[in-house]
Image (tube, rainbow, N blue to C red):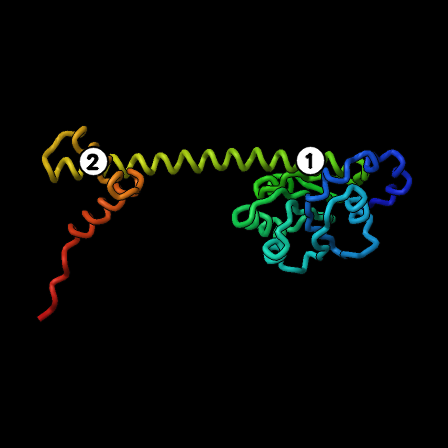
Amino acid sequence: MDLSKYKLNKSKSSAKNIPATENKTVSILLIEKLPKASSMLKKALKDFDYLITKHISFEENIIKQIELCQPDILIMATDLPSDKLLNQLADINQLLPLPIVIFAEHDTPKVIQSAIEAGVSAYVVNEIFPQRLKSIISVANERFKATELLRNELRKAKTQLESRKYIERAKGLIMQQKQISENEAYGTLRKMAMDQGNSLAIVSKNIIDVCELLSTPTPTPNC
């Protein structure tokens, strides 16, 4: 990533006008092909008061470094993300989700699509001016939060649907066993949940598991 214009454009940067506390707690795991102390990207991030928890190469175990460093954002600079890297990012998005920013020299429609599917929050092509870093990171962070909110809502909806299925099935089993109405079966479930201090879904699942266990034929031993 060419940041050679950083020195020429430094006077235009708003870094000096940013309160020191604004970005101080934002930690970044920085990944480059050749992680050098003289990295212009690293220097630009530090000038904006971002905390570089670690500066590593693509050869290192990224997931392990995320576990160790617990960064707020993952930033990487590369020519073009490989399929192997994008697969790693997809794993990260599932196991240890966090905002991911890629600065790349090149792109292709396939790579862009794969990056989006892998959970990349921002994919920036060609030269990046240092004064744009703060806005790019902010947008990536907001996009990540919006994606996580949607994912949590979908997970919540799925859980509610599964819970409803358990409750309906448990009600049916109680109605069949006790020969009572649906309302009475639901009342029985609620009482059991209150007595046990558990949710209706957990109590219903337990009832289903017990019924399935009791209905499973015991194998006849061979004589």
- Residue 54: percent from the left, percent from the top? 70, 55
Please, what secondary structure does the residue beneath circle 1 have?
helix
Which residue lies at the image location 84% right of the left edge and 54% below the top edge? 38
Which residue lies at the image location 63% right of the left edge and 52% below the top edge? 85
Screen quadrant of the C terminus: bottom left
Nearest the viewer among 103 and 158 is 158
Q: Vertical placement of 41 versus 35: above or below?
A: above
- Residue 123: percent from the left, percent from the top? 68, 39
Label 2, residues with CA under 10 Å away: few <14, some 14-19, many ≥20:
many
Q: Earlier in the sequence, mark 1 or mark 2?
A: 1
Q: Residue type at mark 1?
A: Ser
Specify the label residue 16 is tagged with: none
Nearest the viewer among 45 and 18 is 18
Which residue lies at the image location 29% right of the left edge and 42% below the top edge? 197
- Residue 79: percent from the left, percent from the top? 74, 48
Label 1, residues with CA under 10 Å away: few <14, some 14-19, many ≥20:
few
Specify the label residue 138 is tagged with: 1
Query: Which of the 4 quarters of the picture holds residue 111?
Result: top right
Please, what secondary structure does the residue beneath circle 2 have?
helix
Q: CA distance from mark 1 to mark 2?
A: 49 Å
- Residue 40: percent from the left, percent from the top? 82, 48
Q: Vertical placement of 122 versus 89: above or below?
A: above
Q: Is residue 198 left or right of residue 74?
A: left
Q: Furthest-bottom residue in view?
A: 223
Q: Residue type at mark 2?
A: Lys
Specify the label residue 171 is tagged with: 2
So how many labels did they put on this image?
A: 2
Query: Which of the 4 quarters of the picture holds residue 110?
Result: top right
Q: Is residue 150 left or right of residue 126?
A: left
Q: Are marks 1 and 2 in contact (CB under 8 Å)?
A: no
